[in-house]
Image (cartoon, rainbow, N blue to C red):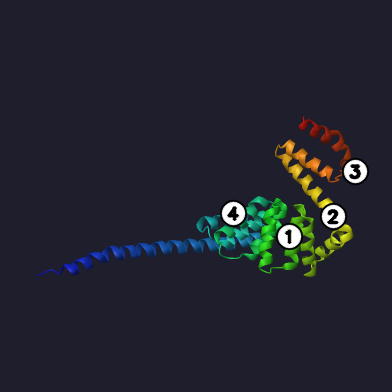
Amino acid sequence: MKINPYLIACTLAIAPCTFLQKLEAKNISVNIDQIDKSNKLEEEGAKKWRAKDNHGAIKDYTEALELNPKNIGALFGRAYSKWELKDYEGAHSDFNKILKTEPDKIHLYTLHNLSLLNFETKNFKEGIEVTTKLISQNFQLNNSYTNRGLYKEKLGNAKGACADYRKGSENGNDIATLRVKESCEPSLFKAFEKKTKNNMLMNRAREKYALGDGRGSCEDYELAKSNGFIPPKKHRLFYKVFTEPYCFLRTI
């Protein structure tokens, strides 16, 4: 019998194709199974969070993420549980992982939580970036403008802070309205501007000192003094007895 070479070629081609199809189906099945288990662990984590068992919730959320690193719900839940346990850096990391996992999506509630959390972690520049994104999406403008104003104030930008407080006030935020009234009126702005800059310089001086940068710390202190900074009465003696001699020694 004459064998058709074309038929042999086709027959031999079927086996590897079928094997690959079965292998692919097996892998899909494993992935679906993992995703299902991950989702169930996420649900268990949410139950524990509602029961105020944040440690147990974090354990479940972490196991869920080991099965499916792209489980956004587990990441969000774990971030929230860490936040409630005052693990601010851990919460900050998990919220940012959500943004990196789905960079093409606008996660408004993740950004909103980061907007608030950045106060705790003192990430003031990132706080401005996050709230700016929220404003661009018209998300809770009363709070977003006010929060961005607070960040700008922390960074010594009194003019930018007042511009945002006014926007927040126009959108009905009571805190923003109070800030405008107490700090941003023309007769009060100069004093607010000086106070804002000095607060920023003194906060930066403390941070530098904590990092071992004594010279940089004293430079910021001198800048604040030249801008009219006067230590609060209860700390005045400390500055006179300890800070002034310490900073004098840094310059010789």
Residue flagged by tag 2: what amino acid is it? Phe
Q: Is residue 167 above or below residue 238?
A: below
Residue highlighted by disc 1: 148
The disc, 4 or 3, on the residue closer to the chain's N-terminal end is: 4
Residue flagged by tag 1: what amino acid is it? Arg
Q: Is residue 96 left or right of residue 232?
A: left
Residue highlighted by disc 3: 233
For the residues labelled 4 and 3, say whether their Cβ atoms are less than 8 Å apart: no
Q: Position of residue 144 (x, y in %)?
A: 72, 64
Q: Residues within 10 Å of mark 1 (few under 14, many from 20)?
A: many
Work out how far the residue at label 1 is from the one at label 3, CA to CA, in angstroms: 31 Å
The disc, 4 or 1, on the residue closer to the chain's N-terminal end is: 4
For the residues labelled 2 and 4, say whether their Cβ atoms are less than 8 Å apart: no
Q: Residues within 10 Å of mark 4 (few under 14, many from 20)?
A: some
* Marking on residue 59: 4
Q: Position of residue 104 (x, y in %)?
A: 55, 64
- Check disc 4 and report its element: helix, strand or loop: helix
Q: Position of residue 229 (x, y in %)?
A: 85, 45
Residue flagged by tag 4: what amino acid is it? Lys
- Check disc 1 and report its element: helix, strand or loop: helix
* Marking on residue 192: 2
Work out how far the residue at label 4 is from the one at label 3, CA to CA, in angstroms: 48 Å
Question: Residue 249 or 101: which is nearer the viewer?
Answer: 249
- Residue, x 46% and y 64% (percent of image)? 32
- Check disc 2 and report its element: helix, strand or loop: helix
Q: Residues within 10 Å of mark 3 (few under 14, many from 20)?
A: few
- Residue, x 73% and y 67% (percent of image)? 141
